[in-house]
Amino acid sequence: MRTYFMAVLFLTFGLFVVPSFGQGRRGESTSNSRHIVYGDIKVDQSQLGSEKPITLDVTLFNEYGNALSKQRVQSNGRYRFIDLQDGRYYIVIEYESMELDRFTIDFSSQYKSDIQHDIELQTRAVSEATKAAVISAADNYNRSSKTSSAFNKAKDAEKNKKYDEATTLFRQVVDSDPADFQAWLELGTVYFAQKNYGEAEKAFNQALAKHADYVPALISLGRLRIVEKNFDGAVEALSQAVKLRPDSAQANFFLGEAYLQIKKGSLAVGYLNEAIKLDPIGMAEAHLRLAALYNAVGMKDKAAAEYESFLKKVPNYPDKKKLEDYIAANKK
């Protein structure tokens, strides 16, 4: 039986702040800067009885699940993605279409910087029955050469924050091919960035009308509804996202946030903790949300523990002193 390789143990999960000339350091205002994420990938192949390097696919996705860039890296090689704008991304490492690892990179918060993320993986042979796709084939959309050109131009305009141009181009795509659910999602994303929430929701709903189980659209719709304070609607969309993708740290995080907003803290705790479990670094902010919840109900020792966990992951947080004072006063 043909075998594939699968990550079974993460030996090292490192996040290092790397000062870089011309790039914003953690805690500084870098709203107009570009960022870099890179790292070494080391694979322990001792269980395989072979030291011959294997080739891995390393793909950068935006937070809506759209692939932005892909690199082929040999085991014990290095990946590098440059010129990234502010925002959330996730990186997926695959071997022959099977996911070995995924992690989130967050350049959207005030504590952002260039990031080095090194990973060491131990591998073992497993049967093809264990193979799991990173992105479902159903989430891919094959567009014509005509709409593909417009779509790519729209993505470039969106990347450069030329939102009016991006809107026009994405509109051309969906007018030409209304079934293009990815283009509908991107159109909604541009409207969201412009704070045109009514049109954004229409576009996200169109994406879901074409592909009801499109998790990136469900997450985007849930986030939008949180902003609009339609928290019950957010819970509806995000619950469906978590049902379809229980391993989505973002879906769990935003569902937890939605439950917090409707005063269902007992439900929120589970989803926020799951987000942390799935993505300890990228979802570090969940510790802050849990701390706020515990503080509000008088469980200050638990709030202090959450703040302490957060600072271990984000040691250069701008309000670190304030959190340290809280921890000192309330830790048991």
Image (cartoon, rainbow, N blue to C red):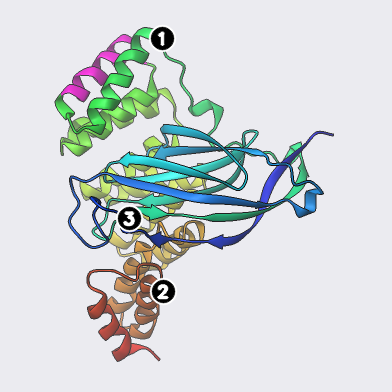
Judging by the rendered image, the residue that carries numbered circle 1 is 144
Counting residues from the start of the chain, the first of labels 2 and 1 encountered is 1
- Name which residue type carries label 2: Ser
The segment highlighted magenta reads: 165-178
Which residue is drawn at the image coordinates 40% and 46% (left, top)?
A: 238
Local secondary structure at mark 1: loop
Q: Quadrant of the N terminus?
A: top right
Q: Nearer the viewer, residue 149 or 63?
A: 149
Counting residues from the start of the chain, the first of labels 3 and 2 encountered is 3
Which residue is drawn at the image coordinates 43% and 45% (left, top)?
A: 90
Q: Is residue 183 above or below residue 104?
A: above
- Name which residue type carries label 3: Ala
Is the residue marked by circle 1 packed among few (<14), some (14-19), or many (20+) residues within 10 Å?
Answer: few
Give the spatial CA distance, label 2 vs label 1.
49 Å
Counting residues from the start of the chain, the first of labels 1 and 3 encountered is 1
Judging by the rendered image, the residue that carries numbered circle 2 is 309
Is the residue marked by circle 3 packed among few (<14), some (14-19), or many (20+) residues within 10 Å?
Answer: many
Magenta span has 170?
A: yes
Q: Quadrant of the C terminus?
A: bottom left
Judging by the rendered image, the residue that carries numbered circle 3 is 258
